[in-house]
Amino acid sequence: MTTLLSRITVEPGKCGGRPCIRGYRMRVKDVLELLAHGASWEEILTDYPFLDADDLRACLEFAAAQNDHVLLHAAAS
């Protein structure tokens, strides 16, 4: 695990066990949605002062890792 990914935490009783940033109630999904809807890093870091740039990088790295698996397709019949 990279240093950045260690910032992503999962706790059964917090946010329904979904991945969060450093134990805060800020889900990785929340940050990714903000970025997807056009929020700049500066806006996010201003609106959520407990976050830093490495937290945003960790969210992106986490999302990339989730997409790194082989897709198996059924054979055409």
Image (cartoon, grey):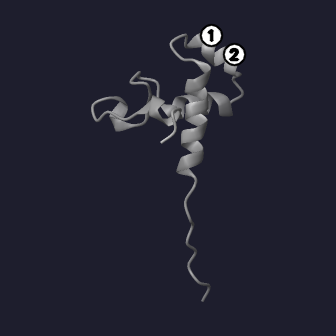
Q: Secondary structure at mark 1?
A: helix
Q: Which amino acid is tagged 2?
A: Glu
Q: Give me the disc on residue 35.
A: none
Quadrant holding the C terminus: bottom right
In this view of the protein, which residue sits in the foreground, 42 or 7?
7
Is 11 on the left-hand or right-hand side of 2?
Answer: left
Q: Secondary structure at mark 2?
A: helix
Q: Residue at x 32, y 33 (%)?
A: 11
Mark 2, residue position? 42
Residue 40 image position (x, y, % from top left): 71, 22
Determine which quarter of the picture holds residue 43. top right
Give me the C-alpha separation between circle 1 and circle 2.
Answer: 6 Å
Residue 39 image position (x, y, % from top left): 69, 23
In this view of the protein, which residue sits in the foreground, 1 or 70?
1
Is 40 on the left-hand or right-hand side of 68?
Answer: right
Q: Note whether 69 is above or below 38 in the view shown.
A: below
Mark 1, residue position? 46
Q: Which amino acid is tagged 1?
A: Thr
Determine which quarter of the picture holds residue 52. top right
Residue 61 image position (x, y, % from top left): 58, 39
Q: Residue at x 55, y 25 (%)?
A: 55
Q: Note whether 54 is above or below 60 in the view shown.
A: above
Q: Note whether 3 is above or below 75 in the view shown.
A: above
In this view of the protein, which residue sits in the foreground, 8 or 18?
8
Residue 15 image position (x, y, % from top left): 37, 30
Q: Residues within 10 Å of mark 2 (few under 14, many from 20)?
A: few
Do the numbered discs 1 and 2 sit on residues whose CB atoms are within 8 Å?
yes
